[in-house]
Amino acid sequence: MSRLALLTGSPGARQEALATELARAGWQVRKLPFDRLELADVTAAARGAEAVFHLGIRTSPSLRAAHRAQLEAAAAYAAGLAARDAGARRFVHVSTVSVYGRPRNLPCDEGELKAPRTALERARWQAEQAAWLACRQGAPLTVLRPTLVYGPTLRAGAVRALAVIALFTRGRRRVPIVRRGPVMHLVHLQDLARAAVHVAEHPDDAAVVGRAFNVGDDAPLPLAEHLAPALEAMGHLPGRVLPYSPRLTSVLLWLVRRVPDRWLLGPANRWLEAAWRELAARAGAADALAPRLDRESLHWMAADHYYDIRRLNELGWRPLYPISTAGLPETIRALVAAHQLPAPTPRGFLGGGAL
């Protein structure tokens, strides 16, 4: 008889990737979407489940930040108590490394001080804290904290950087590339799903219950080394090298943090969306990957962010995509095939034009 897994949270690529990995491992999957403000009857849905996986919820940007954080925390707490009341063996809460804020020690391990910097990061930490509260009340919690997630089915997060490249490099064969840049740690979506299944199936409860695990690939790299294979897969060649100054980036970030979104990021994102729609229409691509600037991305550009994944490795988990230089080109080819990115031409995207 197959084991039953309940997936809670907003539907999306992460949920689908996890459902695929669970089915591959012989699990029966039940999904409970949290796509409204009212929480569903999680306890009833969890009945008979051996594992409950909570992947977070999406909330409306029109809500106040504090309200959005409360909704995320309530969803995580409800999923945890449902796992406890159903007698589940595992409650896996998928959080994020952004709960650490800027790492003070590198590589950043799971015991690092939690100091989220933005409203979004604070909401993720508040949700994780709610899961830990459920753990103290008897939920068999395991927390996963993935690094920057990429993959061919994602339409948000790190993959939006690919749309930025497509937008600002169209018509160019050689593209300037930053010298080194901040060290960034990525993980493929399939590897995140595999990690969730791995901790759910681990035979030693004491090794995973009540513990948190960073999830990343084996090779955090400087931004330039992530970009080079991505540019090649998009039909470009690296051009002249641009200097990178962490101090200058930090100063710019300091200024941006003091300008309200409605005056800076809001207008910038509206311009990016309009420019992307124009590009996508001419290239026959969809507009789901419209570039977007956010405060989290700016923080990641201002400092190194890489993480210690030895704790998860010690459980026997290894990534299928140990380095992004192999996974990113594959992701780009899949996005082009799905008409999410414009197809490359001999002269670069679209073969001409200027912003």
Image (cartoon, rainbow, N blue to C red):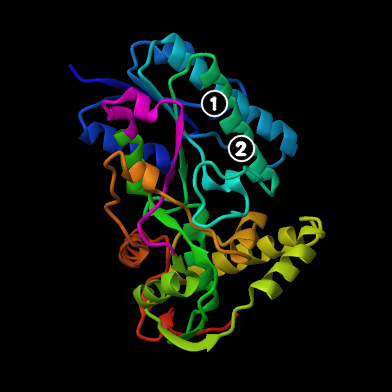
* Residue under the point 62% across and 50% down: 101
- The disc label shown at residue 18, or none: none
Q: Can residue 221 be spotted in the picture? A: yes
Q: What crowding class fits label 1: few (fewer than 14 Cα within 10 Å), some (14-19), or many (20 or more)?
A: many
Q: Which residues are magenta?
A: 199-220
Q: Please count the marks in the image.
A: 2
- The disc label shown at residue 125, or none: 2
Horizontal placement of 322 versus 287: left or right? Answer: left
Is 276 above or below relative to 42? below
Q: Position of residue 184 (x, y in %)?
A: 49, 62
Horizontal placement of 249 versus 229: left or right? Answer: right
Q: Position of residue 194 (x, y in %)?
A: 31, 41
The reply to whether the magenta stretch includes residue 343 is no
Q: Position of residue 199 (x, y in %)?
A: 33, 33
The reply to whether the magenta stretch includes residue 215 is yes
Horizontal placement of 42 versus 196: left or right? Answer: right
- The disc label shown at residue 131, or none: 1
**Residue 151: which quarter of the image?**
bottom left
> Tag 1: residue type?
Ala
